[in-house]
Structure formats: structure tokens, C-alpha cells
Amino acid sequence: MGSAIVCEGVHKRFRVPVDRSTTLKYRLSHPRSTSRFHDLNALDDVSFTVPEGEFLGIIGHNGSGKSTLLKVLSRIYVQDSGTVTLTGNVSPFLELGVGFNPELTARENIYLNGAVLGLTHAQLDDRIDGIIEFAELTDFVDQKLKNYSSGMQVRLAFSVAIQADAQILLMDEVLAVGDQRFQEKCFDTFGLYKREGRTVILVTHDLNAVNLYCDRALMLDHGKLVADGTPREVTGLYKRRMGKASEAEDAKRGVAQGTERWGSRDVEVRDVRLLTAGGDTHRVFSTGEPMVIEVDWVVNSDSVRDFLVALRFDRTDGLSPLAYPSTLLTQALPGMARKGMSGTLRYRTDSWPFLSGSYLMTVEVYDEHRQSTYDQVERAVGFRVIDEKTRLGLVELGGRWEAETAP
Amino acid sequence: MATSAGSAVGSEQIGGATSSAPPRGIIRRHANLTRELAISQFKVKYTGSVLGYVWSLLKPMMMFGMTWVVFEKLFHTGKGSANFTMQLLLAMVMFTFFSDCTSQAMNSIASNGNMIRKAYFPRHILVIAATLTSLMTFAINLSLIVVVAGLLRQLDLGLQSLVFPLLLVELYALVLGLSLLLSSLFVIYRDLGHIWEVGTQLMLYGSMVVYPLIPLVPIRLRTLILMNPLGQMVEDARHAMVSTSIKVPWAADVAGPLYLVPIGIVVGLLVLGIVVFNKLMPRFAEYL
């Protein structure tokens, strides 16, 4: 797949006036006063490439330049130097509900907002029932927007925004509004976008969301790109920088990296991937579809004879453990384990049984007697499951009904 | 990879060098957005008031009533000019469009700061939509006046009336040029709000809205006052619609070849408006 976004050496400088003059009088009486500025480097030599279909998270503290970057990508700001190459059209909105007019009804706002997205009146005529239904606002559609609650406005905005046929979706703090259920709905939709090969870029402070949904994360600090890697690495760095998980605290708990991993590391988990049957990495799956989990391992010690790997699934709403499929490796290894030996384990299921929800997978590696832990990576990877039939419950049992009737 | 039917799919480089002419699909989308914005602004303007759309007619009528009493009945400014009441009415409607449109459009960028900071679309659309909103009101007022006055035989319609649509095009060009210029400058210099209030008042008196050119304006000032494009349009419109006894501005003893000056000013303002707007547009989001 090609690159959706190529950003090369982008600089953006803001001239912040010491005391800003917006009156003609000041301009006329101080014609040479342009020196009373100090420069703020909002973006300083930022370069990165986003492949098509990637879900990228951008994090950073307030004022780090992440929103500026998003605005440069969307052409709201023009960079001072460097180039941005976008393949495919970009969604025009950075936030939900931009351009809504409170004096107009929901219906009128749908047409207005849809026009900003590039949809014609006729296209919206076809889609409006679906939009209203998705926003769950059927009874209120001819009321003025100012009478809507903020939650209703956000639902409406979201269901209009997803009508865009943009290949690249840019979102600034979409999670700051709405309840848990709505946020999950947002991410489900992003997951579907990704499947269609669309690219999503999310600027957020919500590290859990980045860990759970993003394929990759960038971190900005004072306009510089300081980290580019997997969400776990980048959010871990961010937490350490922000002092939320200080190294002292880590040492006290005996945790090597972050707060969610322990063990002797005689056998170490190097990478964990969730794949579709086709072999693409994904974070959103449908109930009943095939799924492959891959665990890359390496043996670091001669004392290892054999080891066991177990996968544990928890739901983010606290139900855990939900499932515990264990894989015994005694037969899998050709003879004795040696230091330096590495490999990949695959857990394959033909029909994923979980119903809609957010899940976290933990990887546990033990010695063959299950006496000591080699490596335990808590919440190694998160994913969403969407049940297209929207059934209630936890799992699809996979059984069949048969009826026998006596007269 | 399969792309959906979007029209702008393709490699697009920004900030660098290449910028090809927009495909037709984009123009259609932008025209669609402009129309939706104009219609919704028109709705917002008149919803919430009891009389609704009627206000778009009532307001200029009340303004006209006041001016008519003051200038026609008290000052007798129209003395010696044919059917000055009708002249005043026509000029008032044109001037109301000019002043409403420029003041609304001037605000169109500054008052949509949230949209400009959070969404990307060509910023011209906001200004053009604002002028179209005023144009809708103008169209309603003008057609009502032409129909009613025509039925009351207050208009002198003939071949000369064919000039009138051209004058409306000229008026819209003037208003659009000024709107682009004012709206972009207003983002940076908020003083313009006050200056333009005085400016429109100046245009009211400087464009012969409330008095006739002949015989009221002294001969040596006639040419000068006709160099004001709005004045030229008002005078031309009176000749075209109200009475052929009113002299056309291009008559040899009025403006003569200098008649091209106001038209040149309109074209110049439109070009200046576009140039200034395009120059300032990339920085709008930073100023708002």
C-alpha cells in the first residue's frame, strides 16, 4: 500500500506579538514596530510518513504542537517551510459540530454540515433518514439545535461527519466529548474506516485510547517529533516524561518497563500481533470472523528447558478473566530450548466468539511446571469487537437449535 | 487500493509547488456549499421574528418612508426632477443592498472564527454566501417594487430599461469587490467596522440617493460626483427605469468619456479585493 501522508521537514512558526496591535491607529503611529514579536516554533522540522489504512495517534502535552500539526495537514494553517503530500481527499472537520448553527433545526444543520463535507442536497436527501436514525434523534429532527443537549448535538455531528467520503480523516480530541458508549461508537466507526483502507489520525490526551486502537503513535514536544513507534512504547515514554509513572516507582514494584510487565525474562515476548485471516494487522474484528494471534518469543537464558505460553482476555469494563486459552509448548519445541532461540507462536480461531466490546489481551510465559513467570505482559494489546447483529451478552455460543414436536 | 467515488482523489501537494486547476467536481461542491450557507443565513436572519421574511421588505420601506418625508416633503430636494418619489425609492433599495451587503460580508470571516480554525474549505465561500444572502433580500424587494410600481404606472419602461440588468451586474461586482477587501482586512484591523459605518453614510449622500443630480448638484460638481460608481449606477438606473427625461451620465454635457472611470473603479476594486483576499487568506486561522 502507498503512503497517505508524507510530511517532510515541516516548520511552522508563530509570531507572537508582545502586545498585539489590531488597530489602525497603532499601525499608523508605529510604522516600524514589527520588531515587537517573539517567535514561537510550533513545529520544528517534523517529518513522518503515514501508510494508507493506518490508525495513527498523536500525543504530547499542551502546546506541544500536535493540534498545529493537524491544522497544517488539513491546510487550515500553511507551513513556513517543508512539504506535506496528501494522497486522497481529507475530511474538512477537525472537531465535531463545527459549523452547526443553533438557530437552525437538526434537519437544516444536516444539509449545511453535509455541504461542508462536499455532499449535495440530493445525496443528503437519500442519506438523511440513516443519519437521523444513527444519531438516535428521530423524534427531534425538526427542533432547533439550541434546544438539544450537548450529547445530542455530538451524536448528530458524528453521524453527519461519518458521511464524508474522505480517504484521510483528521480528528482533534474527538473523545473529549460524549459518554463511554458514544466514544466506543466513534472507535468502531474508525475501525471500519481502517478496513476500507482509509487513514485516521487522532490527536488526543487519552493514552488508553491510543494504546487500544492506534497502530502507531507519534509524540511531539515543543514542536519537535520526539517519538515515533508502537503505541505502547510512545505512551510509555509520555508517561515517564509526564512523571505519571516515575522510574523510582517502577523500581519499587520490580517492573522492568512500564508498570504492566514482570518476570525473569529468561524467555521474553518480543511482539504481539492481532491479524485477520488475510494476514493484515487489525484492532477491530467482527464476531464470528477468523482471527490469528501471533506471539514472537526469544530465549535469553540457558537455564530454560521448556516454557508455556498463555493468553488471557479481559474486557475493559472490568470483567476478567474472560477467557484463558493456554498453549503447551513441550511438543512445539524441537528438543531442548537454547539461549538465543526464537520463534513465533500462532493462536488461530476460525470463528471469533466474543460479542461487541473492548478487550485487552495479556500474554503470560511460564516455565514448564508453571512454577515461575518468565515474562508477563499485562494488556499487551487491545482490540475492539463489533457484532454486526448487535446481540446482547458476552459470547456467541456457536450452537444450533433443533426442534422436535410431538402432536 | 480501491478509492471511493470522491472527486479529489489523487496526489495533491501543498505548500510545495504544484497546484493544478480544481476539477469540476470541486467547483460543483463549492457552489453547493455556497448555496447552502446563503440559504441558511437567510433563514437565520428572519427566523425568531414574528413577521419573518416580511421584515426584509418592511425595513427598507420604513427607511424609505422616513427619507421621503424628510427630503421630498420637508426639503423638496426632488423639485424639478421627474417623479422623484420613485427615483428615491429605487435608489434606496439599491443603496440598502449596498450597505447591508458590505457590512454583513465584512463580518463574514471574523464572525466565523470557529469554523475557520477547525475546518478547511476555501474561505471565499463565506464572503460570497454572505453577499448572496443580501442579494436574496434585494431580489425580493426589487421585484416587488418593479411589479407594484409598474402596475401603478410609476415606471417608464422601454428599450432603455434593458440597461438595468447590466447595472445590477455592475452593482454586484462593486459589492463583491468591496466585500472581499473589507472582510479580509477586517480580520486584522477591527477599526474598519467603525470606518465603514461612516463610509456607507458618506455613500448615501455621495451617491445622489436622496437628491437628483439635475438640477440640485452644481454643474462643476456633477462630473466629480458621477465618478463615484454607486452614484453612476443610481443615476443610470433612474434613467433606465423611472424617466427618460433624466439625463444619462454618459451624455456629452454630463460625464462624457469620463463615464468609464466609475466602471474602471468597479473592476479595479474587484481585482484588488481578490488579490488582497488571496494574500491574507492563508493567515486567517492564525488571526482569529
Image: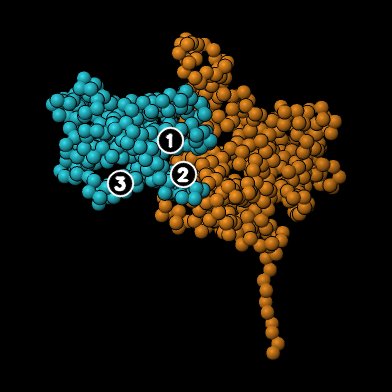
Chain colours: A orange, B cyan
| Neighbour tally class for label 2: few under 14, some 14-19, many 20 plus, Cα within 10 Å | some
Vertical comparison of A322 with B101: above or below:
below
Binning the other alpha carbons within 10 Å of mark 3 as few (below 14), some (14 to 19) or many (20 upward) gives: some
Describe the element under mark 2 as helix, strand or loop.
helix
Give the chain letter at badge 3: B
* Mark 1 to mark 2 CA distance (whole Å): 11 Å
Q: Same chain, marks 1 and 2?
A: yes
Q: Which residue is drawn at 21% across and 37% down?
A: B82
To which residue does mark 3 refer?
B145
Give the alpha-carbon distance from disc 3 to disc 1, as whole Å: 23 Å
Give whichever of B268, A130 is nearer the camera.
B268
The residue type indicated by label 1 comes to Gln
Asked if badge 3 and badge 1 are on a common chain, one would say yes
Pick whichever, A203 or B103, lies toward us.
B103
Q: In the rendering, at what x and y percent does residue A318 appear?
A: 77, 50
Residue position marked by numbered label 2 in the rendering: B45
Kindly report which numbered mark, 3 or 1, lies closer to the viewer in this rendering: 3
Specify the label residue A92 is tagged with. none
Give the SS element for disc 1: helix
